[in-house]
């Protein structure tokens, strides 16, 4: 009997999702026994031409991590979609844009300016910036074109399942593999995680306490037993899907939303604004204004992992953008 | 000039491709390593609170 075929790919990503697959430790051997891995750049030497040579729908399961922010990533997403029966947006970047989607607060021209021309650690006297085509003595070199706007995987191709997290925790990876192996994958569109919020799953004490100000970490010593938000520390747990194992709050770090919005919520940031409004006890415009000012970077905090997937999607471009 | 492309380079963290140009004798004339990816941390970290950076920049490389 031929084994099911799995592909793994990274687009605009850090490799952490691939490492999370390896974090299954010895169970990776069970996975390797169960399936044939036909494409996985971080670990195996298959090239794009190998994938292009496959018949359509050859791959049974594609775990695609990373956001889409270049023509190459869009092309490979479409290629893997055509070759795969089941496409999984794997990790926060593929699901919601993730950290790379913070680039949606800026654009390609500003990024090139900073990275190649201004960054103090860079020596670029020739003022070289990446070009799609470059003539060299021997011929021509090509690079993919960067988009102004970082996209989620689902904004580019159809996606069957979503495994959130930065990175997805090992238990959810094994759950996905197990469901796949048993032929028990959930209905298309399902998110393989909890249906509760991170806040619902958190065992810190909540006292329905109101807050009068927002604290930054250096301004407060938090009580590790109590709800961070009720102590005045921005914690995105109420606006975030659970299933993460509470890795951050257990380390006394507030949630930053890497599991994306909970079921029924489209805009994670709007939900977070609503959660803060619920706990804030301030009267009058002046007090409310003061509290709003205490939140240093509301958009970058509430949309830390989800800007590409939000209603905002990006900062309004200064000029007509490429896409 | 004939060209051999190694795309993508594999078994390392990050994205890259290698273009090998061959001369008339089939020998290597020149080789280019290209990095077809950029996320722009240098730019989008600007404006984020300093205490948040230890949670943002680990995503430069998660390997």
Image (cartoon, coloured by chain):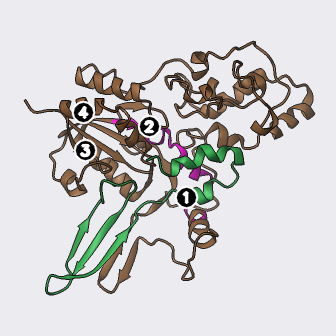
Name the front one of labels 3 and 2: 2
Compared to A234, does A147 lie above or below?
below
Q: Nearer the viewer, residue A242 or A310?
A: A242
Q: Mark 1 vs mark 4: tell me if same chain.
A: no
Compared to A167, does A207 lie above or below?
above
Q: Nearer the viewer, residue B12 or A71?
A: B12
Judge the density around disc 1: few (<14), some (14-19), many (≥20) Cα neighbours within 10 Å: many
Residue A101 seen in render: no
Q: Which mark is residue A29?
A: 4
Name the front one of labels 3 and 4: 4
**Marks 3/2: CA distance?**
21 Å
Q: Position of residue A173 (x, y in %)?
A: 37, 29
Q: Mark 3 vs mark 4: tell me if same chain.
A: yes
Compared to A189, does A118 lie above or below?
below
Quick one: SS at disc 2? Answer: loop
Quick one: SS at disc 1? Answer: loop
């Amino acid at each position: 009997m031929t084994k099911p075929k799995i592909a793994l790919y990274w687009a605009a990503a850090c490799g952490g999702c691939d490492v999370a697959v390896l974090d299954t430790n010895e169970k990776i051997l069970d996975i390797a026994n169960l399936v044939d891995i036909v494409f996985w750049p971080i670990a195996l030497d298959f090239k794009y031409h190998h994938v292009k040579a496959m018949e359509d729908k050859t791959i049974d399961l594609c775990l695609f991590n990373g956001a889409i922010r270049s023509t190459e990533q869009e092309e490979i997403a479409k290629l893997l979609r055509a070759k795969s029966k089941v496409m999984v947006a794997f990790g926060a970047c593929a699901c919601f844009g993730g950290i790379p989607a913070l680039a949606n607060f800026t654009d390609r021209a500003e990024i090139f300016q900073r990275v190649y021309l201004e960054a103090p650690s860079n020596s670029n006297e020739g003022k070289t910036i990446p070009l799609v085509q470059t003539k060299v003595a021997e011929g021509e070199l090509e690079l993919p074109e960067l988009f102004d706007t970082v996209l989620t995987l689902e904004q580019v191709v159809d996606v069957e399942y979503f495994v959130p997290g930065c990175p997805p925790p090992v238990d959810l990876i094994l759950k996905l593999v197990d469901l796949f192996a048993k032929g028990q994958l959930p209905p298309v569109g399902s998110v393989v995680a909890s249906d509760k919020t991170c806040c619902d799953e958190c065992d810190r004490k909540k006292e329905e306490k109101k807050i009068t100000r927002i604290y930054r970490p250096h301004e407060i010593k938090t009580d590790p037993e109590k709800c961070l938000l009720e102590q005045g520390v921005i914690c995105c747990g109420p606006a975030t899907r659970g299933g993460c194992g509470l890795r951050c709050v257990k380390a006394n770090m507030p949630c930053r939303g890497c599991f994306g919005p909970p079921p029924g919520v489209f805009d994670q940031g709007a939900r977070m604004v609503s959660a803060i409004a619920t706990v804030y006890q301030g009267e009058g415009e002046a007090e409310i204004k003061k509290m709003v000012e205490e939140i240093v970077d509301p958009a970058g905090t509430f949309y830390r992992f989800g800007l590409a997937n939000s209603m905002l999607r990006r900062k309004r471009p200064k000029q007509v953008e490429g896409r | 000039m004939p060209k051999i492309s190694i795309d993508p380079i594999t078994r390392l963290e990050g994205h890259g491709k290698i273009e090998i140009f061959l001369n008339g004798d089939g020998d290597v004339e020149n080789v280019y390593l290209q990095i077809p990816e950029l996320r722009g941390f240098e730019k989008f970290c600007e404006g984020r609170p300093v205490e948040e950076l230890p949670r943002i920049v680990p995503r430069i490389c998660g390997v």
